[in-house]
Amino acid sequence: MSHSRYPTEPPDPAPCPPADKSTAQVPVARTAPFTLAAIPNPAEADALARAQQGDHQAFSHLYSLHKRRIYSLCLRMVGNIAEAEDLTQEAFLQLHRKIGTFRGDSAFSTWLHRLAINVVLMHLRKKGLTLISLDEAMEPTPDEGPGRSFGTPDATLTGAIDRLALERAVESLPAGYRLIFVLHDIEGYEHNEIAAMLDCSIGNSKSQLHKARLKLRDSLRTSSRQEARR
Amino acid sequence: MTENHHHDPETCAAFQAQLPELIGSGQAIGDHPHIQSCALCRALLADLETIAEAARQLFPVVEPPDALWAQIESAIQEEEGHAAKD
């Protein structure tokens, strides 16, 4: 028998029902310590405001809304299901601790992603990777940068990239490049959103993404040549 | 289309230096004069587009296991229990 005060299962990510009709239309304006612009979805804004007041049902609703993208981010960054689950758990635990500090200076999803990214980067640091912080992730790394393509034309990628080969190539990227690639090309964030998440310029985001794709191209072509030799 | 089989590294370097901004801006780069004339840079652009498209198709957003929520709420309860004792 469960003694939990929490729902045993998070609700479906359908709009969170308001407490009653009298508060359904404008509950956030009276209670939320953040700007409405930060949460374009009124139901999510309501859930956030209630979660900030300690409402666990509302917190579970926020989990339902964001769990896929946060888990996917963690999974793509570490390439391991067990670690991704641990990191997702840690990210939402930190969200629970810090949710009262959200003031709406950025969109809530941006703020949550930034929190999750820091959890992931901290984990990578503990694993002994040289990357230490978001700032370092976004530092240009010219010495490690992929070579440009000025030489003789080489075989192009055929368009039929194998999933496993791409997974391996993504895992081999330096963490900073991998982060940008995951956020933009896999999760579908725009450069302005990534810049807000990572506290960098839009130009820096574009530049890092381009370098990530060049590195992936190098890796995929190398693995393709190795396959051809076998 | 005028092919340039004699690649001019300087021209390619100048074009490729602009690529992050050109790609990021969402412009139709296929119409760029350099792309029209340079097979090397055209191949590079095709590869980069292939990689981006493959990422979208091969890596869908993933659902975490249902049991994860139970672990999270248990951890929250534990933290709140510790906080209540302090």
Image (tube, coloured by chain):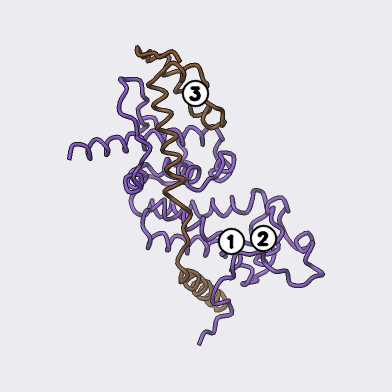
Chain colours: A purple, B brown
In the rendered structure, which disc, 2 or 1, sits on the residue that comes first in sequence? 2
Residue placed under numbered mark 2 in the picture: A44
Give the residue type at disc 2. Answer: Glu
Q: Which chain is disc 2 placed on?
A: A
Above/below status of A87 relative to A164: below
Discs 2, 3 touching: Cβ within 8 Å: no
Q: Are marks 2 and 3 on the same chain?
A: no
Give the residue type at disc 3. Answer: Gln
Report the Cα–Cα distance between label 3 and label 1.
Answer: 38 Å
Task: Give coordinates of residue A146: x percent, y percent.
Answer: 36, 31
Report the Cα–Cα distance between label 2 and label 1.
Answer: 8 Å
Q: Secondary structure at mark 2?
A: helix
Discs 2, 1 touching: Cβ within 8 Å: yes
Q: Quadrant of the C terminus of chain A?
A: top left
Position of A206 compared to B10: left or right? Answer: right
Report the Cα–Cα distance between label 2 and label 3.
Answer: 40 Å
Number of residues whose C-alpha sits closer than 10 Å to that of mark 3, classed few (under 14), some (14–19) or many (20 or more): few
Give the residue type at disc 1. Answer: Leu
Q: Secondary structure at mark 1?
A: helix
Task: Give coordinates of residue B17: x percent, y percent.
Answer: 46, 23
Please state which of residues A79 and A202 is positioned toward the viewer in this rendering.
A79
Q: Quadrant of residue A27?
A: bottom right
* Residue at the image position 68 percent from the left and 51 percent from the top: A38
Number of residues whose C-alpha sits closer than 10 Å to that of mark 2, classed few (under 14), some (14–19) or many (20 or more): many
Position of A3 compared to A41: left or right? Answer: left
* Residue at the image position 39 percent from the left and 13 percent from the top: B4
User: What residue occupies the far left of the structure in this picture?
Assistant: A230
Residue placed under numbered mark 3 in the picture: B18
User: What residue occupies the far bottom of the structure in this picture?
Assistant: A1
Q: Which chain is disc 1 placed on?
A: A
Position of A208 compared to A79: left or right? Answer: right
Q: Residue A65, which numbered label?
A: 1
